[in-house]
């Protein structure tokens, strides 16, 4: 064990986990006394017991959020004051970066190097960016006759439930909290039951920064209990959700069954990563293709899980991708040199392995990986896996696997590539590699996806919107456009005498 690796293991042993929820500024247990174990994916061992909240607890959280909103302690606070507090919140996240990164790694198995260099700074910077935006958003005056003043103003929605996934617990929470809090809402954050620990710590830091009690509540528990209760609650004004398309549809149904609350969804994806024969740097493209599916163990909604390669370069290109994949051997997530960690749960690992079996049964050719590894650790590790000879109607090309499994499909020309790429229920993201500007722009315009990368993959920042077409979701995270999800437009029509 290296010195750096030992440092993180020592920190993990010394850490005192908080297994409670946060309601009204207080750490609380479930009223029922129920708990559930959150598991370290690298060892299969229970990290700690966490409060398992249900309908009564969710109702208490909603009451707390509503009371805080109606009090105006946050919703009517001057924008410059909200800005200052949110900036302090972001600063505290930076100050506690190692602690937050450790919680992310222990809870969901991602490499500590990624948690420390990607997840935590990205989360803090998101909060900071929306803090800066608070006092730079202007309302409007409509063009009217001289005897009329028509004002168009934005107001916070009220109580927002943010239900976030386990693959990027902290980052996805920040994508929701940043604009929702900046707009003046009260928020109930419901982390995935697989990864609840960083959310509770985040709530504590928000209180320390000066966000009033009740403005940010954290509800731990299962999706079918706590999540469903939020979706059906008559006093929740909006649900913003990132996760599977199936669960996204549940929330649409909950809205219809309750108070027609606003629903914003960022759901599944099956991103086509297109490499044209005229790509001038196949090595760069191959590295991007490998990391595009193997980063974060493939547990990424916009992972480049479908690799579309033009026929004339297919064999050469796949060899390059496999070569990169071989450098990404799964290992101890607390080892800073490791780039591939553990799958989040045993259930998810078995799902991934099941899809690898389906791919072979369907006639795709397994040319790299495909096995569970590091079984002696007790953890849930799957090696980088590559299929060739995949047809786009195969399940491994149509269904979201959420693991390090790449399906390679060949195409004849750009027209064929676009047809294959768009033949999906999803439309979250896409990428194209070509040195021909006409091919690049024409292809990008025709791809039905919320994000299209040209000669790169997954490069982005908070200034641009993120979300999908079709069954990949409704609405956008990031950028100023995200604030639209958390505000109502009001027209005030004044007739002058």
Image (spheres, helix red, strand yellow):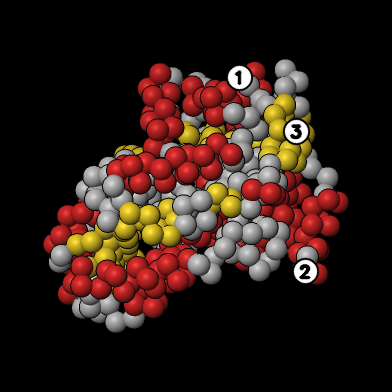
- Asked where in the image residue 138 lies, by quadrant, the reply is bottom left
**Residue 55 got which mark?**
1
Q: Position of residue 348 (x, y in %)?
A: 53, 40
Q: Position of residue 403 (x, y in %)?
A: 47, 49
- Asked where in the image residue 290 lies, by quadrant, the reply is bottom left
Return the residue nearer the eye: 393 or 439: 393
Cα–Cα span, label 2 and label 3: 30 Å
Q: Position of residue 34 (x, y in %)?
A: 72, 22
Mark 2 = which residue?
A: 2
Give the secondary structure at mark 3: strand
Question: Can the viewer see residue 216?
Answer: no
Give the secondary structure at mark 1: helix
How many neighbours does mark 1 have within 10 angstroms: few (below 14), some (14-19), or many (20 or more)?
some
- Report the label total: 3
Left/right placement of residue 245 relative to residue 420 reads right
The residue shown at (63%, 21%) is 54
Question: Can the viewer see residue 439?
Answer: yes
Left/right placement of residue 194 relative to residue 361 reads right
How many neighbours does mark 2 have within 10 angstroms: few (below 14), some (14-19), or many (20 or more)?
few
Cα–Cα span, label 3 and label 1: 19 Å
Position above or below: 82 against 261: below
Q: Position of residue 246 (x, y in %)?
A: 40, 33
Left/right placement of residue 428 relative to residue 482 reads left
Give the secondary structure at mark 2: loop
**Residue 423 got which mark?**
none
Return the residue nearer the eye: 139 or 60: 60
**Going from the N terminus, do you reach mark 3 or mark 1 first?**
3
Mark 3 = which residue?
A: 49
């Amino acid at each position: 064990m290296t010195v750096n690796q030992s440092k993180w293991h020592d920190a993990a042993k010394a850490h005192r986990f908080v297994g409670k929820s946060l309601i009204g500024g207080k750490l609380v247990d479930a009223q029922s006394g129920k708990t559930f174990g959150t598991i370290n994916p690298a060892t299969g061992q229970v990290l700690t017991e966490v409060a398992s909240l249900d309908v009564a607890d969710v109702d208490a959280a909603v009451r707390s959020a509503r009371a805080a909103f109606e009090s105006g302690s946050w919703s009517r606070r001057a924008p410059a004051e909200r800005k200052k507090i949110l900036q302090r919140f972001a600063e505290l996240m930076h100050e506690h970066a190692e602690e937050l990164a450790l919680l992310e790694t222990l809870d969901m198995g991602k490499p500590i190097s990624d948690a420390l260099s990607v997840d935590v700074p990205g989360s803090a910077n998101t909060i900071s960016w929306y803090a800066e935006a608070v006092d730079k958003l202007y309302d409007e005056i409509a063009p009217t006759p001289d005897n009329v003043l028509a004002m168009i103003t934005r107001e916070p929605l009220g109580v927002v439930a943010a239900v976030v996934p386990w693959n990027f617990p902290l980052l996805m929470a920040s994508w929701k909290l940043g604009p929702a809090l900046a707009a003046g809402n009260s928020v109930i954050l419901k982390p995935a039951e697989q990864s609840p620990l960083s959310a509770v710590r985040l709530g504590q830091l928000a209180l320390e920064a000066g966000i009033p009690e009740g403005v940010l509540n954290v509800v731990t528990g299962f999706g079918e209990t706590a999540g469903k209760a939020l979706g059906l609650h008559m006093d929740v004004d909006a649900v913003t959700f990132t996760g599977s398309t199936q669960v996204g549809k549940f929330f649409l149904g909950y809205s219809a069954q309750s108070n027609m609350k606003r629903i914003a969804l960022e759901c599944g994806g099956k991103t086509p990563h297109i490499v044209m024969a005229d790509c001038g740097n196949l090595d760069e493209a191959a590295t991007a293709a490998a990391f595009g599916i193997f980063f974060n163990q493939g547990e990424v909604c916009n992972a480049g899980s479908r690799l579309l390669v033009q026929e004339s370069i297919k064999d050469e290109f796949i060899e390059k991708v496999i070569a990169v994949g071989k450098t990404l051997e799964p290992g101890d997530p607390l080892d800073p040199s490791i780039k591939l960690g553990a799958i989040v749960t045993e259930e998810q690992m078995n799902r991934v392995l099941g899809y690898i079996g389906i791919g072979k049964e369907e006639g795709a050719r397994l040319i790299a990986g495909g096995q569970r590894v590091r079984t002696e650790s007790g953890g849930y590790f799957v090696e980088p896996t590559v299929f060739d000879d995949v047809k786009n109607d195969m399940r491994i090309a149509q269904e979201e696997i959420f693991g390090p499994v790449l399906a390679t499909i060949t195409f004849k020309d750009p027209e064929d590539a676009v047809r294959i790429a768009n033949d999906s229920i999803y439309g979250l993201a896409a990428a194209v590699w070509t040195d021909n500007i006409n091919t690049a722009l024409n292809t990008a315009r025709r791809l039905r996806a919320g994000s299209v990368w040209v000669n790169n993959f997954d490069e982005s920042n908070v200034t641009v919107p993120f979300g999908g077409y079709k069954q990949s979701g409704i609405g956008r995270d990031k950028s100023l456009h995200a604030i639209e999800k958390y505000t109502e437009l009001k027209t005030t029509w004044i007739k002058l005498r």
